[in-house]
Amino acid sequence: EVQLVESGGGLVKPGGSLRLSCVASGFTFSNAWMTWVRQAQGKGLEWVGSIKTKTDGVTTAYAAPVKGRFTISRDDSKNTLYLQMNSLKTEDTAIYYCIIECTSTICAPGWGQGTLVTVSS
Amino acid sequence: DVVMTQSPLSLPVTLGQPASISCRSSQSLVHIDGNTYLNWFQQRPGQSPRRLIYKISNRDSGVPDRFSGSGSGSAFTLNISSLEAEDVGIYYCMQGTHWPRAFGPGTRVEIK
């Protein structure tokens, strides 16, 4: 069974930093493109960014609102996905989820419980 | 960037009746690998989202067969053949073909 467990959220002041983690199990993590998605309170789902596999060059892509401030990385030896968030803004306040990208190699479902990031002074 | 639209945004349905949600993309979602990466997600009140359908019409394991997906190119539909109380929630389509990825605004399904 696919499991994704996010952690690392919390309260941070504007301009601060936070690193989120997502530990994966139940599938071959190293073969999966992974994605971060966020959801502000009462709002819809927003794609944050994605990372490809080592085979595909560990290429990353980011949404415009976070580009240059957020960095996605992965440690395949630990089955863990990371989201480094710098220069945080109040509008980054949201629940952050990691999910598996559907590609021609892997198309497994799975959402974790998410981790709440609150940016406030 | 690809823009995803959904209609209606709110859908009151009588229990036992069918429901249909439309999702359209501003560009074709056919990938160069031949697949069309159009997914449907359900978010029940107070819960994390979960995927129902991937690549237009493939149901995920454990998803009731009253849910079905169809479409091609840039026009897609999620159908619920007979609404049950547990189906109340918000439904999102998402494209995974083009960068940046994009979700639709969501359709709120409620009991009439």
Image (cartoon, coloured by chain):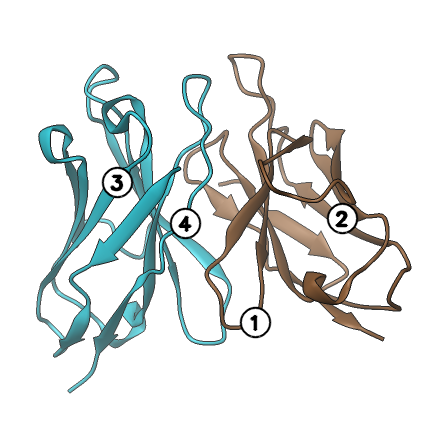
Q: Position of residue B46 (x, y in %)?
A: 50, 72
For marks 2 and 1, give the one nearer the viewer: 1
> Which color has been applied to chain A in this rendered view?
cyan
Q: Position of residue A68 (x, y in %)?
A: 17, 50
Tally of numbered tags? 4
Q: CA distance from mark 1 to mark 3?
A: 25 Å
**Residue that sits furthest to the bottom in the current view:** A121
The quadrant the C terminus of chain B occupies is: bottom right
Q: Is residue A118 above or below residue A64?
A: below
Q: Describe the element under mark 4 as helix, strand or loop.
A: loop
Residue bearing mark 4: A111
Q: Residue at x 17, y 73 (%)?
A: A10
Q: Residue at x 41, y 40 (%)?
A: B100
Q: Residue at x 25, y 55 (%)?
A: A6
Q: Are marks 4 and 2 in contact (CB under 8 Å)?
A: no
Judging from the image, mark 3 belongs to the subunit labelled: A
**Residue kind at label 3, given as amino acid type:** Ala
The letter of the brown chain is B
Q: Which mark is residue B92?
A: none
Residue bearing mark 1: B45
Q: CA distance from mark 3 to mark 2?
A: 32 Å
Left or right of B35 on screen, residue B47? left
Where, by quadrant of the figure, is residue A56 drawn?
top left
